Amino acid sequence: MAIRIYLDEVLKARHMTSKELCKWIGITEANLSVLRSGRAKGVRFTTLNKICYYLQCQVEEILRFDGRLEEGENPEEVFETRSGEEMK
């Protein structure tokens, strides 16, 4: 995955369990587990806002871009417009 999740490290640094965080932000442990494992396809800004608020951290402490595309993505396709013309 091109976006790396560092939620476990931030939880550990804050001496908080994932169960405690779930209680504060109002999501299930199963949903937080999906996020922590990197299997989530997305996260709501409201959820991310609550995570950062209760952990007193910045987004970049939790989510980091590793400089690569998702596995199987073609870099040439990124620059194509909807009409099929390549951007200059």
Image: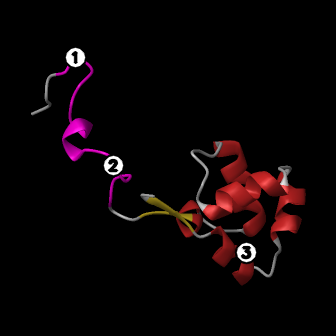
Q: Residues within 10 Å of mark 2 (few under 14, many from 20)?
A: few
Label for residue 11? 3
User: Which amino acid, by three-letter code, is at mark 2?
Assistant: Gly
In the picture, measured across the screen, residue 48 lies left or right of residue 20, that is: left
Q: Give the magenta part as a residue range.
A: 68-84
Q: Which quadrant is home to the N terminus?
A: bottom left
Height in image: 53 above or below 83? Answer: below
Q: CA distance from mark 2 to mark 1?
A: 22 Å
**Residue 48 coordinates in the image, percent (x, y):** 67, 52
Q: Which residue is mark 2?
A: 72
The reply to whether the magenta stretch includes residue 80 is yes
> Where, quadrant-wise, is the C terminus in this rendering?
top left
Callout 2: SS: loop
Q: CA distance from mark 3 to mark 2?
A: 31 Å
Horizontal relation, residue 26 to residue 74: left or right? right
Residue for badge 1: 83
Q: Is residue 82 magenta?
A: yes
